[in-house]
Image (spheres, rainbow, N blue to C red):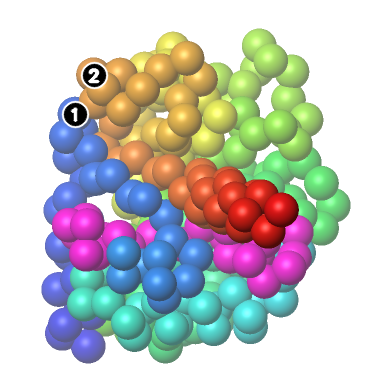
Amino acid sequence: MRDRADKAELLRSLHVPGAPLVLPNAWDVGSARTVVDAGFPVVATASNAIAAALGYHDGEGAPSAEMMFVARRIAASVDVPVTVDAEAGYGMTPEELVELLSGIGVVGCNIEDSDHADGGLIDVDVRATYIARMRAAADRIGVPLVVNARIDSFFPTSPLAEHRKRADAIGRAKAYRSAGADCVFPPGAGPDDLRAIVAAVDAPVNGGLPLKGGSLAELRAIGVARVSVGPQLYRSALEHLHTDLRHLLDARK
């Protein structure tokens, strides 16, 4: 338990505005070990990539047991902190989710506010209460779980009008931080939106790559404390596989 608590505190300490923790998200043991071998200090999972590798759609289309089995295998295969994409919680209570995450050996998680059952976004107060209960459950267990609250105001499935997205994201970020989230993640936010969120919210902010019209250097300049690559490496690996397969087909001619 002490080792996991130390890993959680290490993960938390690596969130530095302007010198962000860069997370090349993994989808299986092989990719996780490759991330560590390359010199990265943390492994993060990407639910989109894991679901696709298992043959399911993203957005809680895959059974939670299968998703968490992969996360467990990843956590057991590396010595660095592992943070898992827990999507919207798979219908579990906060206490059940935290107990599961602790049991599989991870020390951080993403929790998002997309409503996969009914569409749109989960009410901000409902999600903030969920995060507060997660924090309380983690405190009882004794592992200071690093909670990255994903804010889907800018997501393609968001029902918000364009002019409302930034204010909604800032309001959600403040509520989730007050509830006990360690950092906030507004995927799909452009550079100007990220600057506004970083300026308005007293929390480490996670940016995503690829950034609309921007780069890792721009994310550093904006002041984000964490950068997620998401499923891009998985998709890149598939592109390389397709290229290799085409070469094999051509070689048969």
Quarter of the image for residue 143 reads bottom left
For the N terminus, the image quarter is bottom left
At label 1, the amino acid type is Gly
The mark found on residue 90 in the picture is none
Where is residue 85 drawn, in percent x and y? 50, 61
At label 2, the amino acid type is Ala
Asked if 217 appears above or below 71 in the picture, the reply is: above
- Closest to the observer: 212 or 188? 212
In the image, residue 44 lies in the stretch drawn in magenta: yes
- Closest to the observer: 172 or 221? 221
Magenta span: 35-57
Going by the image, does 6 lie left or right of 183?
left
Name which residue lies at 47% across and 14% down.
213
Please report whichever mark, 2 or 1, sits nearer to the chain's N-terminal start. 1
Mark 2, Cα crowd under 10 Å, few <14 / some 14-19 / many 20+, is few
- Say which element carries label 1: loop
- Closest to the observer: 160 or 74? 74
Which residue in the structure is indicated by mark 2? 221
In the image, residue 222 lies in the stretch drawn in magenta: no
Going by the image, does 164 lie left or right of 194?
right
Name which residue lies at 63% across and 83% down.
65
Going by the image, does 10 lie left or right of 102?
left
Where is residue 230 drawn, in percent x and y? 49, 47
Which residue in the structure is indicated by mark 1? 18
In the image, farthest residue toward the front: 253
- Say which element carries label 2: helix
Asked if 124 appears above or below 11 in the picture, the reply is: above
Whether residues under marks 2 and 1 lie with C-beta atoms below 8 angstroms apart, the answer is: yes
Asked if 187 appears above or below 167 in the picture, the reply is: below
Going by the image, does 195 lie left or right of 88?
left
